[in-house]
Image (cartoon, rainbow, N blue to C red):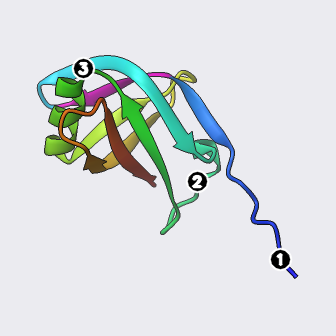
């Protein structure tokens, strides 16, 4: 008997990415509701879409802040980027 795995809620919107020397907007998609995060080891994965140059610079920076449409700000750790791609992948942890 197979059990259906619960699919995470996709939280999408337009936000602002900030890291030293940069502040700009782009689209984000987060697998889960960041407001539901609790202090500890829980993380949510997501991606930030911008120009290829901005995505690469954010990935190389390693850490940044993401301001969601709701106005809430989260610290993110960049986890991946494909050369020439316009998406930088990240994890949110509190």
- Residue at 83%, 73% in the rendered image: 3
Q: Which residue is mark 1?
A: 2
Question: Where does residue 57 sit, x and y in percent of width and height?
Answer: 15, 33
- Residue at 28%, 17% in the rendered image: 24
Highlighted range, magenta: 14-19
Around disc 2, counting alpha carbons within 10 Å, would you say few (fewer than 14), some (14 to 19), or many (20 or more)? some
Mark 1, secondary structure of its residue: loop
- Name the disc covering residue 31, or none: none
- Residue at 69%, 44% in the rendered image: 9
Q: Nearer the viewer, mark 2 or mark 1?
A: 1
Q: Alpha-carbon distance for marks 3 and 2?
A: 25 Å
Is 51 in the magenta? no
Q: Quadrant of the N terminus?
A: bottom right
Q: Which residue is mark 3?
A: 23
In the rendered structure, are the residues bearing label 2 and label 1 in contact, judged by CB atoms less than 8 Å apart?
Answer: no
- Residue at 17%, 25% in the rendered image: 53
Around disc 1, counting alpha carbons within 10 Å, would you say few (fewer than 14), some (14 to 19), or many (20 or more)? few
Left or right: 61 in relation to 13: left
Question: Where does residue 28 sit, x and y in percent of width and height?
Answer: 46, 30
In the current view of this chain or complex, which residue is farthest to the right?
A: 1
Nearest to N terminus: mark 2 or mark 1: 1
Nearest to N terminus: mark 3 or mark 2: 3
Q: Between 81 and 43, which is closer to the camera in this rendering? A: 81
Mark 2, secondary structure of its residue: loop
Does 30 appear above or below 84?
Answer: below
Q: Which residue is mark 2?
A: 37
Q: Nearer the viewer, mark 3 or mark 1?
A: 1
Mark 3, secondary structure of its residue: strand
Question: Where does residue 4 sit, x and y in percent of width and height?
Answer: 81, 66
Nearest to N terminus: mark 3 or mark 1: 1
Query: Can you tell which quarter of the image residue 85 is in?
Result: top left
């Amino acid at each position: 008997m197979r059990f259906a795995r619960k699919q995470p809620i996709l939280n999408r919107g337009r936000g602002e990415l900030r890291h030293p020397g940069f502040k700009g907007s782009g689209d984000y998609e987060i697998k889960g509701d960041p407001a539901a995060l609790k202090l500890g080891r829980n993380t949510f994965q997501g991606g930030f879409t911008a120009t290829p140059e901005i995505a690469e610079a954010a990935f190389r920076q390693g850490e940044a802040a993401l301001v969601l449409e709701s106005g809430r700000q989260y610290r993110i750790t960049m986890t991946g980027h494909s050369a020439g791609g316009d998406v930088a992948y990240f994890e949110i942890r509190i």
